[in-house]
Amino acid sequence: MFGNIGWTEGLVLVFILLLLFGARRLPEMMKSMGHGVREFKKAVSGASSTDENERSEEKESKEDS
């Protein structure tokens, strides 16, 4: 039902956002959203790599025992 957004829906969405926030404010908002998404991905990938490091350390300590 809410699958892919087509180009017409995207265009309508952009038009509504321009009406609500204005042409000056919209690029600032998108930039801050991009930074937020980037930080989120960085935190998620950092957490998964930390988990993998902890698991490998646990395996090594069990093998040494």
Image (cartoon, grey):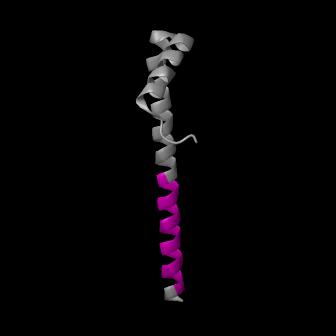
Question: In the depicted view, which residue is nearer to us: 22 or 44?
Answer: 22
In the displayed structure, would residue 27 be above or below residue 9?
A: above
Whole-percent x, y for residue 6 in the image = 44, 33
Q: Quadrant of the C terminus?
A: bottom right
Whole-percent x, y for residue 46 in the image = 48, 54
Q: Quadrant of the N terminus?
A: top right
Q: Residue at x 53, y 17 (%)?
A: 16
Which of the 4 quarters of the picture holds residue 27?
Answer: top left
Magenta stretch holds residue 37: no
Q: Residue at x 47, y 53 (%)?
A: 45
Q: Residue at x 52, y 56 (%)?
A: 47
Question: In the depicted view, which residue is nearer to us: 29 or 19?
Answer: 19
In the displayed structure, would residue 50 be above or below residue 59?
A: above
Query: Bounds of the magenta span?
Result: 45-62
> Number of labelled discs?
0
**Magenta residues: mostly which secondary structure?**
helix
Question: In the depicted view, which residue is nearer to us: 23 or 14?
Answer: 14
Whole-percent x, y for residue 18 in the image = 49, 14
- Please, which residue is most extreme toward the left here? 7
Q: Residue at x 50, y 10 (%)?
A: 22
Whole-percent x, y for residue 14 in the image = 47, 20
